[in-house]
Image (cartoon, helix red, strand yellow):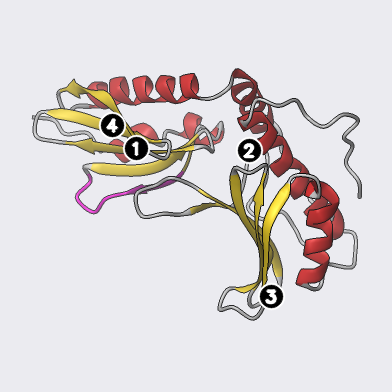
C-alpha cells in the first residue's frame, strides 16, 4: 500500500508561496505534519494504516471527516477539505486581506538609527495601538532579550521587543499548534522586519491590519506608512 508523506502534500510550493501554510514541521516517521494555516489556525495531519485524519486547532480541535486510503490523493482530499473549513471559520474580510498581503513583498527600510531599547519599542507600540492595548508588561534582561507583552483588541496576546544578542526587533503572535508556538512573520513580510523606526511602524501597521481583519473590522481610516 502506498503511504504518502503528508508534509510534502500539505506544504506544496504553491501553498507555502501564498502563505496558506507556514511553520510546517513533519514527524520523524514521515506520517504526520503540523502547520499554521492562513496565519490563524493550527493544522495537524496524520496518515494511519488505512485513512488520513486531519484536525484544525482554532484553538479548540475541529475534526475534519477522514479520507479513506493513505496515498497522495487521499491526503490531498482531506487537506483541501480542512483548508475550506478554515476559510469558512474566518471572516471574508480576513480571507481577502490574507490573499492580498500574500501577493505583496515589503521592501526593507534602511534608514538609521535603529531602535535601541525597549522603551522605544513601547513608544512605537503605543503610537499604533494606544487605544486598543491592555495588560502591558515590560520585561527586561530575559534570556531572549527585552520585550513587551501586551493584549490587543482584548483578543490577541503579542510579544514584541529586541532579541538577544544583536538587538533585532521581533513581533510574535501565539498560534494554536499542539506544542505551542509563535508566528513571527505575516503575509507579505520577509524573514525579518528590520529594526529601524520605519520598519517597526510597518510591522505594527501590518499587525494592526491582521487583527482588525480577523475581527472583521475595516482598516483604520487614512492609514499611511510613516518612515
Q: Is residue 197 left or right of residue 50?
A: right
Identify the mark at residue 187; answer none if there is no mark. Answer: 2
Q: Is residue 110 left or right of residue 162?
A: right
Earlier residue among tags 1 and 4: 1
Q: Which residue in the structure is indicated by mark 4? A: 54
**Residue in view at x 81 percent, y 73 percent:** 116
Q: Compare residues 168 and 206 and report the one nearer the observer.
A: 206
Q: Which residue in the structure is indicated by mark 3? A: 166
Q: CA distance from mark 4 to mark 2?
A: 24 Å
Within-10-Å neighbours for mark 1: few <14, some 14–19, many 20+ = some
- Quarter of image, res 7: top left
x, y percent for residue 9: 34, 32
- Quarter of image, res 143: bottom right
x, y percent for residue 202: 79, 47
Earlier residue among tags 1 and 3: 1
Q: Is residue 36 visible?
A: yes
Q: Quadrant of the N terminus?
A: top left
Within-10-Å neighbours for mark 3: few <14, some 14–19, many 20+ = few
Q: CA distance from mark 1 to mark 4?
A: 15 Å
Do callouts 2 and 3 mark residues in contact (Cβ within 8 Å)?
Answer: no
Earlier residue among tags 1 and 2: 1
**Residue in view at x 56 percent, y 31 percent:** 18
Q: CA distance from mark 2 to mark 3?
A: 25 Å
Q: Is residue 145 above or below residue 41?
A: below
Residue 130 is inside the magenta segment = no
- Quarter of image, res 71: top left
Instruction: State which region is magenta.
Output: 23-30
Earlier residue among tags 4 and 3: 4
Q: Which residue in the structure is indicated by mark 1? A: 8
Identify the mark at residue 150; answer none if there is no mark. Answer: none
**Residue in view at x 78 percent, y 55 percent:** 125
Amino acid at each position: 500500500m502506498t503511504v504518502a508523506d503528508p508534509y510534502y502534500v500539505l506544504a506544496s510550493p504553491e501553498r507555502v508561496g501564498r502563505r496558506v501554510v507556514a511553520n510546517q514541521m513533519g514527524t520523524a516517521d514521515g506520517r504526520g505534519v503540523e502547520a499554521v494555516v492562513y496565519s490563524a489556525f493550527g493544522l495537524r495531519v496524520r496518515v494511519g494504516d488505512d485513512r488520513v485524519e486531519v484536525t484544525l486547532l482554532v484553538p479548540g480541535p475541529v475534526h475534519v471527516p477522514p479520507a479513506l486510503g493513505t496515498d497522495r490523493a487521499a491526503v490531498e482530499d482531506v487537506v483541501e477539505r480542512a483548508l475550506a473549513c478554515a476559510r469558512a471559520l474566518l471572516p471574508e474580510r480576513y480571507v481577502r486581506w490574507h490573499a492580498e498581503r500574500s501577493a505583496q513583498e515589503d521592501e526593507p527600510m534602511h534608514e538609521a538609527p535603529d531602535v535601541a531599547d525597549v522603551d522605544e519599542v513601547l513608544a512605537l507600540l503605543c503610537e499604533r495601538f494606544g487605544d486598543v492595548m491592555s495588560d502591558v508588561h515590560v520585561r527586561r534582561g530575559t534570556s531572549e532579550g527585552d520585550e513587551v507583552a501586551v493584549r490587543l483588541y482584548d483578543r490577541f496576546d503579542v510579544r514584541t521587543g529586541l532579541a538577544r544578542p544583536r538587538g533585532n526587533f521581533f513581533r510574535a503572535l501565539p498560534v494554536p499548534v499542539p506544542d505551542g508556538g509563535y508566528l513571527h512573520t505575516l503575509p507579505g513580510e520577509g524573514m525579518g522586519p528590520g529594526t529601524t523606526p520605519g520598519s517597526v511602524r510597518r510591522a505594527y501597521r501590518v499587525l494592526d491590519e491582521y487583527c482588525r481583519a480577523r475581527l472583521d473590522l475595516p482598516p483604520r481610516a487614512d492609514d499611511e506608512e510613516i518612515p
